[in-house]
Image (cartoon, rainbow, N blue to C red):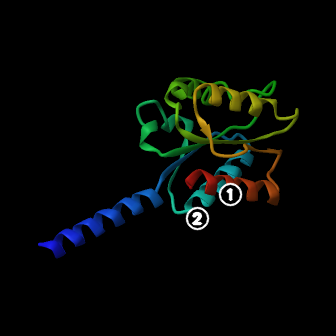
Amino acid sequence: MYGLTWVTLLNNRMAGEWRKIMSKVAVVFWSQTGNTEALANAVADGAKSAGAEVSVLGFGDINSSNIDSYDAIAFGCPAMGAEQLEETEVDPVFTEIESSLSGKKIALFGSYGWGSGEWMEEWENRAKTAGANLAGASVICNEAPDDDALANAKKLGETLAA
């Protein structure tokens, strides 16, 4: 009996550690030119390399009813218009899930073609106001991501999964 109890406790401990290592991470993005998609893939690669189970999704695949299925979420969107989130898919979904972000570990990333990255500062402020915990510095790049931007995105994914 004692041997069986010891094995059960050991298996339960190992299962708990496995669940801790295998966090569920969603990488949710919208991309018009492929630049933000390249960053999303790097974030996903980083999270996978850190041992996470990763789902790469579009904004139409996430909502307030399934957001709790993920331990952490990375959101990606390029700057649009006058440095703002994309208005037909991204902003409506982010607005709908904003109240579900309290205490959630998230990361933000995206690309821009002009300006200075104001859209990301505003997005970070919205997330913080909603109570989200930013996993690390947001990753932004001007136009197509270079090797440094991709490395930073991968590192962001690793940090998100930790």
Is residue 23 visible in the rendered image? The answer is: yes
In this rendered view, identify the residue nearer to me: 4 or 123. 4
Corner quadrant of residue 73: top right
Corner quadrant of residue 88: top right
Query: Residue 16 location in percent, x, y?
Result: 36, 59
Position of residue 98 in the picture relative to residue 34 (left or right):
left
Q: Which residue is mark 1?
A: 154
Q: Residue furthest right?
A: 115
Name which residue lies at 59% across and 41% down.
Answer: 106
Disc 2 on helix, strand or loop?
helix
Q: Which residue is mark 2?
A: 49
In this rendered view, identify the residue nearer to me: 11 or 149. 11
Position of residue 63 in the picture relative to residue 84 (left or right):
left
Query: Residue 56 location in percent, x, y?
Result: 54, 49
Q: Quadrant of the N terminus?
A: bottom left
Position of residue 31 in the picture relative to residue 144 (left or right):
left
Amino acid found under the numbered disc labelled 1: Lys
Please, is residue 82 above or below residue 73 in the view?
above
